[in-house]
Amino acid sequence: MSLNYDLPEEAQMIRDSVREFAEEVIKPRAKELDDKEEFSPEITKQMGELGLFGFTVPEEYGGNGVGYLPYVVAVEEIARVDGSQAATVAAHNSLGIGPLNYFANEEQKKKYLPPICSGEKVWGFGLTEPDAGSDAGGTKTTAVEDGGDWVINGAKMFITNGSTDYSLGSTVQAISGKRPDGKKEYTCFIVENGTPGFVTKTMHEKMLWRASITSELYFDDCRVPAENILGKRGEGFRQMLATLDRGRLSIAAMGLGCAQGAYEMALTYAKERKQFDQSISTFQVNAFKLADMDMEIECARNLLYKAAWLCDQGRPFGKLAAMAKLYCAEVAHHCCNHAVQLHGGYGLMKEYDVERFYRDQKILEIGEGTSEICRLVISRYIGCYDV
């Protein structure tokens, strides 16, 4: 028996085509879009045309159905150049398209998946609230049944892709009643932008991912029909947890790509920069930093690819997804920190991309399960707590 670490041919082809696109299309505009805090519908549409949306969606609904391993490879390659565009791809696939792909009925899939898989439109994932982040069960947004409709009231925040003119809608979790055991019942609803009582607002002055759209969603007696329930009533919390499990793979891929990009910039600069008549890469203290970066990236890639492979095989992957998200995010932190240090004062200037990477990496330790929450998830898997 043999153990093959080679990427499948299809994943290699996707990696090569996405790297070329990232270098030729995204990289030349990354700094400008970051400076202007500007979302690019043109690049988003081009990414859709390249097939970067709908990696797990069947072709009949507009996707390409190639699976999670090629997906994380694609996200990694974009994050190697720019975190903002990688965030658009990762959030749209895992959080926007994912719940509709896995839990929507046939009519809902046919209506919503084709336009959001093409890149013509994007979709949000309404979970986080002003007072409910790591504690997703702390949701306060409510949905009350009224005849054949549901009336939603509440607010969501930090929602990627929720408020651009190209946002078609969002999947929203709300408290829809009580279960027989007295605990809160959660249901997810499909809410289209433009629905009366539903207002979206773009958040500005972010430290990071400045060229991606981050939104606040407000619901004031927002009325949606019963057919807008995603899946079945009461299944919302389970749907959200399943979505986050898969979403952690994409955030891990962002961390891996961010680390790879920072490492490459640091290595190139260290070889070119001379002090005391020699390249600073020859100083042992710097050489060891670069060696550690390369080693950590290699470990992170193996962990993430294994988690994605398990997901594609239909095998349990939740523990490794949490591990990969946690480790890749922290490797990104280490690599960006070392990269700035190696650049010295230049690393603090916006002229150098490493400054943007240093800002962008921080969200990876917070979004879709903070590093602390990921450690809690892992500790539950290994039996530290009764679940």
Image: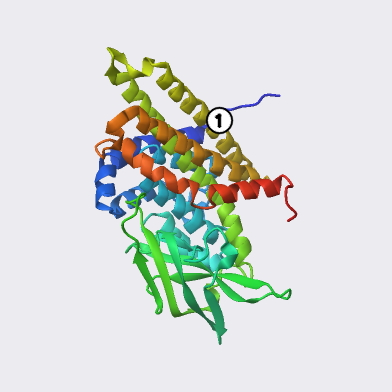
Seen in the picture, residue 139 relative to 70 is either above or below; the reply is: below
Quarter where residue 289 is shown: top left
> Residue 298, percent across and down?
52, 28
Please name whichever residue, 234 or 267, is drawn nearer the observer in this view of the structure.
Answer: 267
Give the residue displayed 24% in from the left and 52% down from the top: 36
Taking the image as shown, residue 271 lies to the left or right of residue 225, namely: left
**Which quarter shows the C terminus?**
bottom right
Quarter where residue 219 is shown: bottom left
Please name whichever residue, 110 or 358, is drawn nearer the observer in this view of the structure.
Answer: 358
Report the amino acid beneath label 1: Cys
Please name whichever residue, 379 or 80, is drawn nearer the observer in this view of the structure.
Answer: 379
Coloring applied to the structure: rainbow
Seen in the picture, residue 176 relative to 366 is either above or below; the reply is: below
Q: What residue would you read off at disc 1?
A: 299
> Residue 300, percent across and down?
54, 34
**Which quarter shows the N terminus?**
top right
